[in-house]
Image (cartoon, coloured by chain):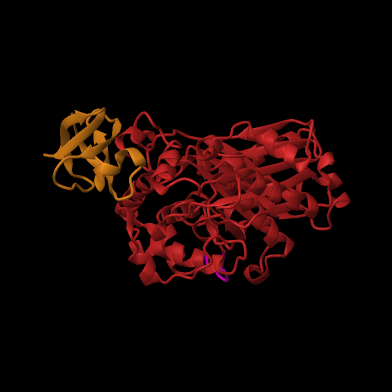
Amino acid sequence: MKGVIYTETVVFAPPEQFAADAPYQLVIVALEDGKRLTARVLGERVTIGDAVELAESRNGIPFFHKT
Amino acid sequence: MRAVAVIGIGKTAFGAFADRDLRSLAVEAGLACLADAHVSPSKVEAFYLGNFAGPSFVGQNHLAPYIAGAMGVEHVPCTRFEAACASSGSAFFHAVSSVAAGMYDLVLVGGVEKMTSQTTPKVTEILAGAGDMSGEGCAGATFPALFAMIARRHMYQYGTTREQLAAVAVKNHANGAKNPQAHMRKIITMEQALNGKPIADPLTVYDCSLVSDGAAAVLICPLERASEFTSKPVVVKGLAQTSDHVALDEKDDITTFRAVKEAAQKAYKMAGVTASDIQFAELHDCFTIAEIVATEDLGFVEKGGGGPYVLAGKTCLHGERPINTSGGLKSKGHPVGATGVAQICDVVLQIRGEAGERQVARNHLGLAQNLGGSGATAVVTILGAA
């Protein structure tokens, strides 16, 4: 699954269940099929317009990384 | 449809009140409102309550009759409305609709939230429930994160700057410092606002509204009966509620709130006015970016013009169109279920000419904009002198 970063943030104040993950980058990916998906980022921080692809899914959360 | 007037307003102070429970706050606001209109609780024909998450925050359900009974409002329809941060805006919309339709004459509309008895991570988790918990929520989206992503995109598309976001916070704190009922009566500098603790990049703690306890209430009746209760009735000139997708990633363009634009157009049409006629407004600044976007969606400025508009001082207390003279959600506080009705109270206060140090000179036509979630519910109300 490939796409382009539509928008992004880094979360420093997480909800209770994700306390151990913070800070983490959260993004909306514009997928090739025209849909958008809220996801996390693995590795290098991304910015709007970066090309990304799905790296893995963990506990139902999609993680993308830069291509 | 009958014309409807606001004939009474009442609010608690907003803040963190360890010794106050949800019901006592709602009762205080309701009774203050009834006293303002010189109306006995036994005369109220229906009670509409806005509350977002009482069951999660304090473990109490069935809130409307629970509160009404303690006020002496008994044996009438009492109903709770939930629409995230637009809960009491929505309650107001439905209450006005029923009075306009001739169902009732005297209706009390309240809003309340008791948030500070929970830890910040728990509050963050409860608030996240106003988004889509099966998608964005399960990926770790908080509300600051959703609005941070809106801000990032707005910066990308329109060149909006950190300084423009911070200008919203600086202005609203300057106003809130003059509001005796505000949660954080503190002036902040641009430098402070730019260097706050990061919450969700690019938003810092100074871009985020407050976690507050508080309640607000208004009493409405048909305009034709308003003079029985007050010499200063305030008329509901225009009012609309609309909705949109709950999940941010399902919206075509996240730099605009489609529901706000649509509600505004409907409300302007009903009032027979245009955006340029609005003299002052209370806008839903849950985050600084939200006020900037709202000024655009309401048509006060063109798309992308919201940042320069606030930075140029056009919306400050003595600017061309004062916005959030109450201090807004940023400084007055944001007990989410109380916010919509509290905004109505603040607009009414200005129209009556009773805003004290915060009084604006051009006070005949004001607007309140209440937003639920990341734009899934919008309520726009236009209020004017009789």
Question: Which residue is located at x 34 percent, y 31 percent?
Answer: B135
B65 or A63, which is in the foreground?
B65
Is residue B320 covered in magenta? yes
State the image quarter where residue B384 is shown. Answer: bottom right
Where residue A66 sits in the image (x, y, percent)?
A: 14, 41
Q: Is residue B264 visible?
A: no
The majority secondary structure of the magenta stretch comes to loop
State the image quarter where residue B205 is shown. Answer: bottom left
Q: How many marks?
A: 0
State the image quarter where residue B320 is shown. Answer: bottom right
Q: Is residue B125 visible?
A: yes
Q: Which residues are magenta?
A: B314-321
Q: Is residue B65 left or right of residue A56?
A: right
B313 or B171, which is in the foreground?
B171
Quadrant of the snapshot with the N terminus of chain B: top right
Where residue B78 sits in the image (x, y, percent)?
A: 71, 33
The tint of chain A in the picture is orange
Quadrant of the snapshot with the C terminus of chain B: bottom right
Question: Which residue is located at x 62 percent, y 68 percent?
Answer: B358
B136 or A7, which is in the foreground?
B136
A44 or A36, which is in the foreground?
A44
Question: Which residue is located at x 33 percent, y 66 percent?
Answer: B195
| Relative to B66, residue B20 above or below | below
The tint of chain B in the picture is red
Where residue B341 sits in the image (x, y, percent)?
A: 63, 48
Question: Which residue is located at x 43 percent, y 56 percent?
Answer: B288
Q: Is residue B146 left or right of residue A60?
A: right
Q: Residue furthest front?
A: B19
Where residue B360 sits in the image (x, y, percent)?
A: 64, 67
Is residue B350 covered in magenta? no
Q: Residue furthest right?
A: B228
Q: Is residue B276 left or right of residue B27?
A: left
